[in-house]
């Protein structure tokens, strides 16, 4: 017994020594619980694999989690978020509450747990005062630029107030100004960091969204053949315009009847009840199917058995400059995309996309109808989608760039060795982020 206790004590001391050698870093994400943020989960796993110790600060989900599911030891410090809703005052209360909790948890992590650097994910862009304090005390700060806050505000508000837009733009610039490094989700966001944010090029790194190749099973011959199934996977809020997909399905019934095809809408959001009512009112229940929110294996199975993915986002400054996560999820399974001709959508999908001018129901219906009957074109688009994913978009490529940025902020000790690959599967549900 004494020998076993001594051995256990030595093992515990060795573990503590290894933990102490690993740089401890924090990540703050406040627009949703970390267990629902695929990008942040992948970032945590990549940092773990490289030899960092990670703690995430985030709002509390349905249940309180102490550690990130699927990780070795990434800790979670969560807080309740009682403020949520629409309108400037509601958002201000939500952001102020989140700022106070992030500041508190970060102070505890720095003073008691030796956190040496932090990453904050926007929105909101209100954490630059914390960046000032961290930088002033010799600690690093990374700004992970998920969304364009001024454009997002304009997209969600019928009559944007110029004073609010100017304030959001100022906060965005300060968030970049005081960061050690800025991580951008695509080339358009990088250009905004260089121009509107005033960043030097060497401080801005592109890290795109998307699954790891290791998470996606290779398409089989059955997958390639598919059935005539059009799929939408993602959030169903007003700015996502999923109603256009439903209206396109109605137009398709006039073009090709009701047999041999279906539209599957997977996800949830504030507009889901409205869409269900629309389908019932228009008698589309036999061609439009809702699955609700799906877990990752269910999403994978749905997309692998689909023919086309639809991205119904219409043009705005926000959508034109953002990369939709669902687009990369489609392409990872070799799924051609039908979308409005948006700058970053075309940069992402290339020839794997079929683009319509404005996103009207008639435009979508015509494009879908033609593609469903053109097997040779579908085969070419599938090949392009898979090639672009495996060679450019897969998380393995993004993780390398992400870790390079972190190593510039917090160099790893020479003795620290990576214990796990950076492309471990992400145990979460269908994509929520647009960029």
Image (cartoon, rainbow, N blue to C red):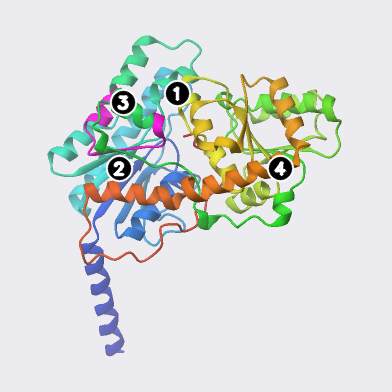
**Residue 69 rendering spot, x and y as whole percentages:** 46, 56
Who's the residue at 20% across and 61% down the image?
413
Instruction: Identify the magenta region.
Output: 171-188
Residue at image mark 2:
119
Q: Are marks 4 and 3 in contact (CB under 8 Å)?
A: no
In the picture as drawn, the residue positioned furthest to the left comes out as: 137
Residue at image mark 3:
172
Q: Nearer the viewer, residue 309 or 8?
A: 309
Do we see residue 234 in this rendering?
no
Who's the residue at 57% across and 22% down the image?
314
Quadrant of res 148 = top left
SS class, disc 3: helix
Q: Are marks 3 and 2 in contact (CB under 8 Å)?
A: no
Q: Residues within 10 Å of mark 4 (few under 14, many from 20)?
A: many
| Relative horizontal placement of residue 93, taking residue 105 as reference (left or right) | right
| Relative horizontal placement of residue 26, taking residue 116 as reference (left or right) | right
SS class, disc 2: strand
Q: Nearer the viewer, residue 268 or 329?
A: 329
Do we see residue 306 in this rendering?
yes
Q: What's the CA distance linking mark 4 and mark 2?
A: 38 Å
Q: What's the CA distance linking mark 1 and mark 4?
A: 31 Å
SS class, disc 1: helix
Q: Nearer the viewer, residue 290 or 320?
A: 320
* Dot in front, 4 or 2: 4
Quadrant of res 321 = top left
Can you tell which mark lies on residue 152? Answer: 1
Q: What's the CA distance linking mark 3 and mark 2?
A: 15 Å
The mark nearer the N terminus, 4 or 3, is 3
Q: Are marks 2 and 1 in contact (CB under 8 Å)?
A: no
**Residue 124 rendering spot, x and y as whole percentages:** 36, 29
Residue at image mark 4:
307
């Amino acid at each position: 017994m004494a020998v076993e206790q001594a051995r256990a004590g030595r093992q515990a001391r060795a573990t503590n020594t290894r933990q102490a050698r690993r740089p401890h870093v924090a990540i703050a994400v406040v627009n949703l619980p970390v267990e629902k943020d695929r990008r942040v989960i992948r970032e945590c796993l990549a940092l773990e694999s490289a030899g960092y110790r990670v703690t995430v600060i985030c709002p509390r989900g349905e249940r309180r989690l102490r550690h990130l599911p699927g990780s070795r030891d990434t800790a979670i410090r969560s807080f309740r978020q009682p403020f949520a809703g629409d309108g400037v005052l509601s958002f201000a209360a939500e952001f102020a509450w989140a700022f106070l909790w992030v500041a508190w948890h970060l102070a505890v992590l720095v003073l008691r747990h030796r956190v040496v650097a932090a990453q904050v994910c926007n929105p909101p862009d209100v954490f630059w005062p914390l960046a000032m304090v961290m930088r002033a005390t010799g600690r690093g700060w990374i700004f992970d630029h998920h969304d364009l806050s001024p454009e997002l505000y304009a997209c969600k508000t019928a009559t944007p107030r110029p004073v609010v837009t100017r304030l959001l733009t100022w906060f965005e610039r300060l968030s970049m100004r005081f960061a050690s490094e800025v991580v951008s989700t695509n080339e358009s966001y990088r250009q905004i960091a260089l121009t509107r944010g005033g960043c030097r090029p060497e401080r801005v790194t592109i890290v795109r969204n998307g699954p790891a190749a290791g998470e996606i099973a290779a398409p089989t011959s059955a997958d390639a053949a598919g059935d005539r199934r059009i799929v939408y996977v993602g959030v169903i809020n007003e700015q996502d315009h999923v109603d256009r997909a439903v209206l396109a399905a109605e137009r398709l019934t006039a073009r090709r009847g009701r047999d041999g095809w279906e539209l599957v809408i997977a996800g949830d959001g504030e507009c889901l009840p409205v869409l269900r009512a629309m389908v019932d009112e228009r008698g589309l229940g036999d061609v439009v199917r809702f699955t609700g929110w799906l877990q990752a294996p269910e999403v994978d199975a749905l997309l692998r058995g689909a023919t086309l993915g639809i991205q119904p986002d219409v043009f705005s400054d926000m959508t034109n400059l953002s990369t939709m996560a669902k687009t990369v999820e489609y392409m990872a399974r070799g799924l051609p995309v039908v979308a409005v001709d948006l700058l970053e959508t075309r940069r992402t999908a290339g020839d794997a996309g079929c683009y319509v001018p404005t996103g009207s129901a008639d435009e979508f219906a015509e494009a879908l109808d033609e593609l469903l009957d053109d097997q040779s074109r579908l085969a070419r688009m599938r090949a392009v989608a898979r090639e672009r994913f495996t060679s450019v978009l897969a998380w393995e490529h993004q993780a390398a760039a992400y870790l390079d940025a972190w190593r510039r902020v917090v160099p790893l000790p020479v003795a620290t060795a990576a214990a796990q690959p950076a492309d471990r599967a992400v145990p979460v549900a269908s994509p929520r982020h647009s960029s």
